[in-house]
Amino acid sequence: MNLSQLHVLIVGGATGGAATALLLARAGARVTLLEKVAQPRAVGAGIALAENGLAVLESVGLGPAIAAHGRAVGIPAIVDARGRRLLAPPQPTPQVRMFRRSALQGLLLDALAAEPRIERHFGAEVLTAERDGRLTARVDGRSVEHRADLIVGADGVHSRVRASGNFGAHVHAPGIPYLRALVDVDAAQGVEAWTGAGIFGSFAVEGGTYFFASAGARACRRAIEQRDLPSLRAVWARTYPPSIPLLAAVRSFDDLILNRVLRVECRQWVDGRLVLLGDAAHAMAPNLGQGANSALVDAAVLLDELRRAPDLAAGLDQYQQRRRPAVAHVARTSANLGALAELTNPLARWLRDRLLLPLASRLGGDRTSRVMQETTATLLAIGRA
Ligand SMILES: Cc1cc2nc3c(=O)[nH]c(=O)nc-3n(C[C@H](O)[C@H](O)[C@H](O)COP(=O)(O)OP(=O)(O)OC[C@H]3O[C@@H](n4cnc5c(N)ncnc54)[C@H](O)[C@@H]3O)c2cc1C
C-alpha cells in the first residue's frame, strides 16, 4: 500500500515507538508521536543491542551515532563464580554493542526532532484508544482527541493501548527482581556470572561500567527489602568477588534501579486500527537481552508488511503472523535461560553446570538466527528502501 496516504498515531517515544516513527515517516507516512513524559530521559542504566536491533537503527541513518556511543562487547560469555566458562557462545557469534540508556534515548530523540514528517507531543498521556482509530490523551490536565488511520501501541509493559483493545493479553510476574546500576569506575568483567546468589554481569559502557544482578537468593532479597546496601555488598562479595569494586562505587541505595521482571503474552497484536509492538505486545525475561532488539525488529517488519500489503488490514495481519511466532520462541528461550541462571540450590546448580550446559553446547545448531529473528540484510533493506 502507498504509505503517503497513511496517518499514524504512535503512543510511546522510547526505543520501539521512536524507531517506528522514524521508519514510517521516512517511508512517506504522516506520523504523530505521543509520549507521556514531558521531558523524556532514559529509565534504566545500560542496554545491549545485538545485530538485529543495530541493523534497524543503522537503516535509519544512525550508524555513526551507534559507533560513537555503543561499546562493542561481543557476545557475553556465561561463566561460574570462579570465572570458568559454562556455556559456549552461540555460533555464528552476533555483534553486540553496549549503550548507556541515556545515550540511546538521546540519539533517538535527536533523530525524531530532525524528521519533518513527525509531529511530536511530549507530556501527552494516552488514556484510551479505540479500534476505529480515535484516541484520547491528557495534556496539561485537559483531554485532547486525536484520530488516525492506525494507532501503534509502543507504550511499554503497562500499555494503555493494550488495555483499551481486545488483545487477549496476559501479564505474568515471574517474581525475581533485578537490580542495575551505572558506576563511573572501569571494572567491567565483560561476562555474565551464574553464581550461588544468582546472576551478576558487568560490561563497559561509555565512561564507566554497567552492571546488573538478579536478586532471587534470600539474602539478596532481604538486603533489598531493607534497602541495606552494606549487606547487599557483603552477600555479593562472598559469592562473587569481582562485584566488590562495582558495588563499592554505588554511593547510595537510591542509585540502584530495581525491576521486577514482567512478561506479556497476547493472543493477538492487532485489533481493528490498533496494533501493538515492543514490550506492549511481548515484554520478556531479560536473559537473552532481546526485549528492545525485538521492539526494533517489530518496527521494521511492520513497515515491510504495510508496504507489501494491498490494504491496512492485510498488512497488520501479515505483521502479526510474521512476528508473533518469532518473538514467542525468543521469549520462551529467554525465560528458560533465566530459570536455569537463577538456580541457587547447590545440587541443581551442580547438575546444570556438569551435565546440562555441556550437553547444550554440544548440540550446537544455528541458535543465533532464531534469536536474531530476521537477517541483518533484510532489516537493513527494509529501512533503506
Ligand atoms: C533488567 C532488564 C534488563 C534489560 N536489558 C536489555 C538489553 O540488554 N537488551 C534489550 O534488547 N532489552 C533489554 N531489556 C528489555 C528492554 O528494556 C525493553 O524490552 C524495551 O525497553 C522495550 O521498549 P519499548 O519501546 O517497547 O517500551 P518502553 O521502553 O517501556 O517505552 C514505552 C514508552 O511509552 C511511554 N508511555 C507509556 N504509557 C504511555 C501513555 N499512556 N501515553 C503516552 N506514552 C506512554 C513511556 O513513557 C515510554 O517512553 C531489559 C529489561 C530489563 C527489565
Image: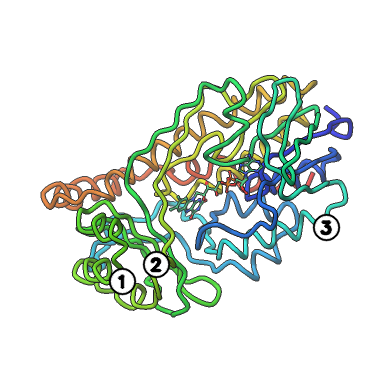
Residue 345 makes an appearance in the image: yes
- Where in the figure is residue 168, as x and y percent of width and height? 51, 21
Q: Can you tell me whether the CB of the residue at mark 2 lies under 8 Å from the nearest atom of ligand 1? A: no
Residue 378 makes an appearance in the image: no
Among the 4 quarters of the image, the one containing residue 164: top right
Asked if marks 2 and 1 touch (Cβ < 8 Å), the reply is yes
N-term-proximal mark, 3 vs 1: 3
The kind of residue on which mark 3 rests is Ala
The residue that mark 2 highlights is 202
The kind of residue on which mark 2 rests is Ser
Q: Residue furthest left?
A: 347
Q: Residue at x 51, y 36 (%)?
A: 282
Q: Residue at x 75, y 39 (%)?
A: 142
- Where in the figure is residue 57, as x and y percent of width and height? 67, 54
Q: Is residue 142 left or right of residue 367?
A: right
The residue that mark 1 highlights is 243
- Looking at the rendered structure, the secondary structure element under dot 2 is strand
Cα gap from disc 2 to disc 1, whole angstroms: 8 Å
Q: 362 or 14: nearer the eye?
A: 14
The circle on residue 255 is: none
